[in-house]
Image (cartoon, rainbow, N blue to C red):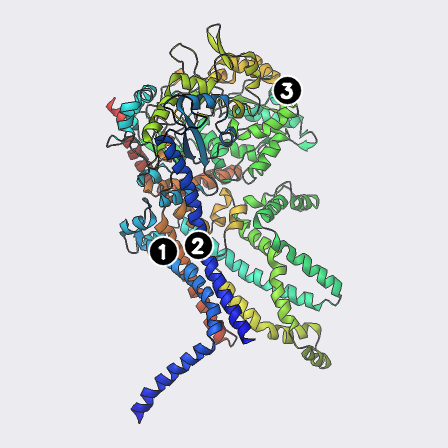
Amino acid sequence: MKVLMKLSALILAVCFILTACQQPESGTATTEQTQETTGAEESGTTAPAATEAVPEAGLQPQTFTIYIEDVIADRVEENFQGAVSKIITQDTGVTVQYQFGVGDVSEQITLMIADQAYPDFVFSRSHLNNFLEADAYIDMAPLIDQYGANIKAVYGDSYEKLKDADGHVHYLGQDFIRPIVEDPEDSFEIQHAVLKELGYPEIKTLDQAKEAIKSYIAKYPEIDGQPTIGMTLTCGEGWRYFITLINPGLRALGFPDDGNFYVNPETYEVSYAYALEGIEEYYRWMNGMYNEGLLDPDAFTQTHDEYLAKIASGRVLALTDAHWEYVDGENVLIEEGKYERTYARIPVTLREDIKHPAYRPSVYTPMNGVGITTNCPDPVRAVQFLDYLCQEKTQILSAWGIEGVHWEIKDGRRQWTAEEAVARFEPGHGIETGIGMMTYPWPCIGGGEDSNGYKFNPLDDSEVLWTNYNDEIKTTLENYGVRSWKEMFPAGDEFKASEWGQAWLIWDNQPTDSEFSRLHTECNDLTAQYLPIACTVAPEEFDATWAEFLQRLKDVGVDQLGVEATQLLADNFYVHVAE
Amino acid sequence: MNSSINSKTPRSSFSGFLRKIHRQRYLLLMSVPFLIWVLLFNYLPLLGWSIAFKDFRLKGPVIESFINSQWVGLKHFEDLFADLGTQGRFYYALRNTLGMSLMLMVFGFVMPIIFALMLNEIRAARFKRVTQTISYLPHFISWVVAAGMISAMLSTEGPINDILFSLGLIEKRIPFLANGKLFWGIMTGSEIWKELGWNAIIFLAAIAGVDPGLYESAGIDGASRMKQIWHITLPCIMPVITVILIMNVGWLISIGFEKQMLLGSDITRDYSEVLDVYAIKYGIGQSRYSFGTAIGIFKSLVSIILVLAANTFAKKAGETSII
């Protein structure tokens, strides 16, 4: 018995020690593995390996890895195997492997920095400063001077803005260097059925929109057996309240998308938009919608799936959403053939004299983009690859596809071939062909015209848009006498461009532990909390609620936030001021 | 004489200690891995607390960043309490944490005891078993699923509104989850629904251990069922209740955050944001690791004080204590 106990104690102890020891071993095994693979790539560049994929003499195959903070699922599915991607590999020898942020991105990036385990390229939408502070990026400036003629050509004047105070270039600006004038993503959406029923009335102001919704509900309190919902929002999950609750308020007042800030175009003084006088009028309108039963009572708490399910049921008459956010719900309606329940995109503002800012132009702001990390084994090759991407023919290849297969020059325009015009709008098209894979966040020209005067982007062309609308959309558009949604909105040249650029990029790329970011988060939190409350209180309590909101913003330090933001804008503004 | 005793006693006690070690050497050997475990995972990480007194910024490898960061003393704690003074987010987070856990302590602790007592009085064995099983099933549902069920139940088109509406108790459907003032109640209610049966198990076990002879003699003396519960069952399970209470007090400030995060929304933030969420959002979420650690230390200190206080109180009251 005693021996047995001795033995079992020993075995138990040994087992524990062994399992404790095993963990680091398995850990090193995986790092060795990854080192092996990167090692293989390195040897691939130094020794001319006799693999079958060598396309041209002197072009050894090279795999570049890139980390992107958000998941772009089709890039993984495409896996650099589409026809377009194969041409890129043929020209450069390069294939790209994507790594995406999963789970807690902050934590993932923190670990990446702590381990110095960077891929070859990094694009971080909201943690740029963490990488900069850790010196993760190499300085591209000397390499671009040597190999990057096309990069310089594409960025033009903006290239100087990419340089930091010491003249280093750590990243290239993200898309789009020139805006694509396609259909608006952000607008007021209202069902075709409502417009048809009311004889396509003029809906320019919020009050007109409300009347339209109200009269339709009065006629049809139920749709397909379920109660009709006038309007709904998606605010229940994290950042989504920005899209359907916060941004529409700014749009209705005609403010450009400068984040939650308002930049005074004369003095460049910045203030927090929700502390401005007048902004409450949009939310007073929402409050009216809610109290008259036109706004879904669950609007502020439902999950995004519940929101999409409501849209898919066809009983939500109006939205204030971005197209990419509600499109999944709308697609269900299209599949079921309920075209009249899909949405028309119209410019609705608070008053008729306010211009909807969808196409308000702004100077290109290269605040963030793809950078090469210190781990990249061959920075020269990496810069050459970026330079290749900036070439005009690569940009056309990436946006249009292959000449003769996907597009042709006809009637003085670059056009899709007959098959492509159909195939383009089928799901999975990009994955099969590789078209559109080398856009965001890679350097991408976007809109405008190439050296021959043809469009860089297919969707820039109203005719292209028209041919791809369904009949329901065409009917609605014809009744309003236009040929695309974008023609319903005030055109870009009606505005003075915001010469400070896209200010939201400046706010988004501040160090997360700065005083500015702390104040910004606190103010945004209050806004996210009080806007729903203001929308749902009784109408007579609205003013008191709004006053309470302003008071708490003040307590948190909204004035200080404005001062900090003004300073930041000035700091990131030097190139313009010099101009 | 005195000195010889003095010099002898420690030696003999020391050799006695060695003898004891020798006698228990296998038991000690068996406990070594667990000791290492505790040191490695519970005590070693405490070294990280030192970054609460530094301005830690991650610039490359962790150790290097740690060495390069500045000592700032109690700056982060001062920030924290300055926030408390101005009724900023930390004030609300602390208030919500303590408020919700106190409610949970009171109701979430008393209900399982009452439930266990009631269940114990049921004579139909099959019914009793089925009831018990049903009551602790929700414990095995994860909060993510449970939150989905609760928000569906409470939505304006959900069954609770349907019932209230059809009974004519309300004129307008109530968006329960959009009303901050109801949030603590909803939290407590859903926690009780989920954990009632599970928490009652330990009390049922304690009740099962009560000597049946006591009930018999009480019955002969003419004690009613209520009297028997009050004078026999409750005093007999009192030690268990005390121990559980002390342990619960220790968890008072760490009520977790899943359910608050899942059921709370922006509109109810003043009532739903708890300390953990605050630490994630304003500490780690903003790369302010030092600040986040300061919150963690604050939480631990409060927990220790609460446990010690509850323990002393229990000792004074003449009940068992755990320390």
The nearer-to-camera label among 2 and 3 is 2
Q: What secondary structure is found at the residue carrying circle 2?
A: helix
The residue lying toward the viewer, choosing from B98 and B237, is: B237
Q: Which residue is mark 2?
A: B94
Q: What secondary structure is found at the residue carrying circle 1?
A: helix
Q: Is residue B167 left or right of residue B262?
A: right
Q: Which residue is mark 3?
A: A197
Q: CA distance from mark 1 to mark 2?
A: 23 Å
The furthest residue to the front: A50
Query: Where residue B232 is drawn, which disc sits there?
Result: none
Q: Which residue is mark 1?
A: B48
The kind of residue tagged 1 is Gly
The residue lying toward the viewer, choosing from A52 and A70, is: A52
- Image coordinates for residue A32, horizontal then vertical, percent: 41, 44
At x 60% / y 45%, what residue is drawn?
B148
Badge 2: chain ID: B
Q: What secondary structure is found at the residue carrying circle 3?
A: helix
The furthest residue to the top: A411
Badge 1: chain ID: B
- Image coordinates for residue A431, horizontal then vertical, percent: 53, 26
Badge 3: chain ID: A
- Above or below, comparing residue B150 to residue A570 in the picture: below
Please rate how many residues cluster around mark 1, counting C-alpha atoms within 10 Å: few if below 14, some from 14 to 19, many from 20. few
Please rate how many residues cluster around mark 2, counting C-alpha atoms within 10 Å: few if below 14, some from 14 to 19, many from 20. some
Q: Quadrant of residue A261?
A: top left
Taking the image as drawn, is residue B93 in sight? Answer: no
- Image coordinates for residue A205, horizontal then vertical, percent: 50, 23
Q: CA distance from mark 1 to mark 3?
A: 66 Å
At x 51% / y 63%, what residue is drawn?
B248
Please rate how many residues cluster around mark 3, counting C-alpha atoms within 10 Å: few if below 14, some from 14 to 19, many from 20. few
Q: Quadrant of residue A199?
A: top right
